[in-house]
Image: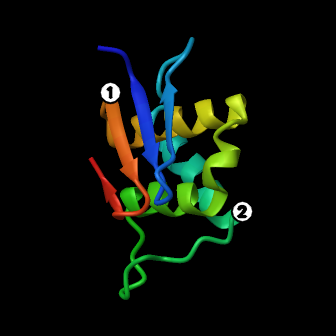
Amino acid sequence: MRAEVVVKFGDGQEVRVPLEGGAPMGHEEARQWLDAEFVAHECEPLRASGKVLIVDKLLSIAQAVGPAQFRQADWAQAYARAALGATGRPHLRVDVAALQVS
């Protein structure tokens, strides 16, 4: 099965990012990359408790950057490598509108 991240936005746009020419990041590297992007894009915690889960970071970052950022191939590949590495899954669907990661 081909490793891939699919990001769905509320306006019906869907971005597919197949992992090309590389493996997912290691778990710790992926967490660090997601942390840095979360801060860089001034994302806010989704939960009232303030706790930020990996899935929350994936959703918040995708929402903050929008579909346009995913057209930047290098950035999209880094997001996919981090998403797959942080979750340990070969295929991931990030539904920004529904606030779900599956």
- The part of the image, by quadrant, that contains residue 76 is top right
Q: Measure the C-alpha gap from mark 1 to mark 2.
A: 26 Å
Task: Give left or right: position of 80 versus 75.
Answer: left
Query: Mark 2 = which residue?
Result: 40
- Kind of residue sitting beneath label 1: Pro
Residue at figure coordinates x 60%, y 62% from the top left = 38
Residue 91 vertical placement versus 38 (above, below): above
On the question of residue 17 being in view, the answer is: yes
- The part of the image, by quadrant, that contains residue 71 is top right
Residue 45 in the image: state x and y as whole percent: 48, 77
Callout 2: helix, strand or loop?
helix
Query: Mark 1 = which residue?
Result: 90
Residue 21 in the image: state x and y as whole percent: 57, 11
Which comes before the other along the chain, label 1 or label 2? 2
On the question of residue 27 being in view, the answer is: no
Residue at figure coordinates x 64%, y 40% from the top left = 70
Q: Within 10 Å of the Cα at label 1, are there few (<14), some (14-19), or many (20+) other Cα atoms?
A: some
Residue 17 vertical placement versus 44 (above, below): above
Residue 3 in the image: state x and y as whole percent: 39, 22
Callout 1: helix, strand or loop?
loop
Residue at figure coordinates x 51%, y 30% from the top left = 17
- The part of the image, by quadrant, that contains residue 50 is bottom left
Q: Within 10 Å of the Cα at label 2, are there few (<14), some (14-19), or many (20+) other Cα atoms?
A: few
- Kind of residue sitting beneath label 2: Ala
